[in-house]
């Protein structure tokens, strides 16, 4: 099965590098300057400096060339996914499209699989998600991910095609659970980063992770997910990684909010928009999402970290 990666950020480049170990792969970038630089230097110096692009990896700015592949991995930011699909729907129709972004769209409250279904005719949508950092994948370090596809047989075919020497994929047909697990853990990671940035300690982070996981499960189940999915790689696994590592951009954002410094410029922090979108969804559906609501208020500047912690600590006492 031929494969292309749409999006040349750190994660898209890392996936392309790993997949190129199994055969030719095309990596598409919308920036002609970046295409030329990667072709010349044979590395993505902007996003993954120091890691060579294998000879089996072709870099292109021609979407038609990339779309010749049977399977396309969509490694674009969540809030840009719909625009990319709308712009290139004519060449993506009928393809297997595997979203590699995590989040909930502002306005629609939809995840990537349903956005693909809405924008591209006859697309076979799937989602690749789970605990992973781009540099780990690009360096060939072992990583396990979830491949979510409503069509179980197609999911198994994609599993075989996208498994590499360092990427081990597990399948699920619970696309809603996989979407929400990957999206909501970013919100909790911002909260954990804020706690650590404010110097509130490991015990406070452990409490936030635990109660945050309960909130993730509670929301996902109301949307039709299987609670067991959230206990897997796409939920708990990803939560553990992003809430405890400074490599996580969501954690970094929260840490900056907590200690009053500036977050990394030009970094895509998916949890910011997801917190706002999910908080709005929760209010519409009458759901109790205190951590998500708090993070949404924190990232929009409505409250500060001290007010956020005070609000959570003074909530009515209840059973666990």
Image: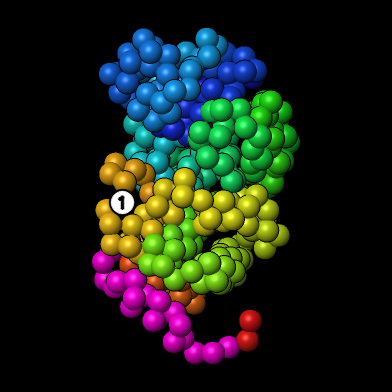
**SS assignment at label 1:** loop
Q: Callout 1 environment at 10 Å: few (<14), some (14 to 19), or many (20+)? A: some
Q: At which x and y percent is residue 7? A: 42, 29
Location of residue 259 with respect to 105 vertically, above or below: below
Using residue 279 as the reference point, say whether residue 239 is left or right of it: right
Residue 214 in sight here? yes
Location of residue 272 with respect to 46 vertically, above or below: below
Residue 6 in sight here? no
Q: In which quarter of the image is the C terminus?
A: bottom right
Q: At which x and y percent is residue 39? A: 39, 11
Task: Tell which of 58 and 304 is nearer to you.
Answer: 304
Residue found 57% across the figure and 68% down from its top: 206
Task: Tell which of 82 and 268 is nearer to you.
Answer: 268
Task: Tell which of 27 and 51 is nearer to you.
Answer: 51
Coloring scheme of the render? rainbow
Residue found 72% across the figure and 34% down from its top: 156
* Range of magenta residues: 299-318
Q: At which x and y percent is residue 316? A: 49, 90
Using residue 257 as the reference point, say whether residue 230 is left or right of it: right
Give the labeled residue for mark 1.
263
**Which of the 4 quarters of the picture holds residue 258?**
bottom left
Residue found 28% across the figure and 44% down from its top: 265
In this view, which residue lies farthest toward the bottom? 317
Residue found 30% across the figure and 23% down from its top: 31
Q: Does the magenta stretch include residue 192?
A: no
Location of residue 143 with respect to 270 vertically, above or below: above
**Number of numbered discs present?**
1
Location of residue 8 with respect to 197 vertically, above or below: above
Q: In which quarter of the image is the N terminus?
A: top right
Q: At which x and y percent is residue 196? A: 44, 63
Task: Tell which of 84 and 171 is nearer to you.
Answer: 171
């Amino acid at each position: 099965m031929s494969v292309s990666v749409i999006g040349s950020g750190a994660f898209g480049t890392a996936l392309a590098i790993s997949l190129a170990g199994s055969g030719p792969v095309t990596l598409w970038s919308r920036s002609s300057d970046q295409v030329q630089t990667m072709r010349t230097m044979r590395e993505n110096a902007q996003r993954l400096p120091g890691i060579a692009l294998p000879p089996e990896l072709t870099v292109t700015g021609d979407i038609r060339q990339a779309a010749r592949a049977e399977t396309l991995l969509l490694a674009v930011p969540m809030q840009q996914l719909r625009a990319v699909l709308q712009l290139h729907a004519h060449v993506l129709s009928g393809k297997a499209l595997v979203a590699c972004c995590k989040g909930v769209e502002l306005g629609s409250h939809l995840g990537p699989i349903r956005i693909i279904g809405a924008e591209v005719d006859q697309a076979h949508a799937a989602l690749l998600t789970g605990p992973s950092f781009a540099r780990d994948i690009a360096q060939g370090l072992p990583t396990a991910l979830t491949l979510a596809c409503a069509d179980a047989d197609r999911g198994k075919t994609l599993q075989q095609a996208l498994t590499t020497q360092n990427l081990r994929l597990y399948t699920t047909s619970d696309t809603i659970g996989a979407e929400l697990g990957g999206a909501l853990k970013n919100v909790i990671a911002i909260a954990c980063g804020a706690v650590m940035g404010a110097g509130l300690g490991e015990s406070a982070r452990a409490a936030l992770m635990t109660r945050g996981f309960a909130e993730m499960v509670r929301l996902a189940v109301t949307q039709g997910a299987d609670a067991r999915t959230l206990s897997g790689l796409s939920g708990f696994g990803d939560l553990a990684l992003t809430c405890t590592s400074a490599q996580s951009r969501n954690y970094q954002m929260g840490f900056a909010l907590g200690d009053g410094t500036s977050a990394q410029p030009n970094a895509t922090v998916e949890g910011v928009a997801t917190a706002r979108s999910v908080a709005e969804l929760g209010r519409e559906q009458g759901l109790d999402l205190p951590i998500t609501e708090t993070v949404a208020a924190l990232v929009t500047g409505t409250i500060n970290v001290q007010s956020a912690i005070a609000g959570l600590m003074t909530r009515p006492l209840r059973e666990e």
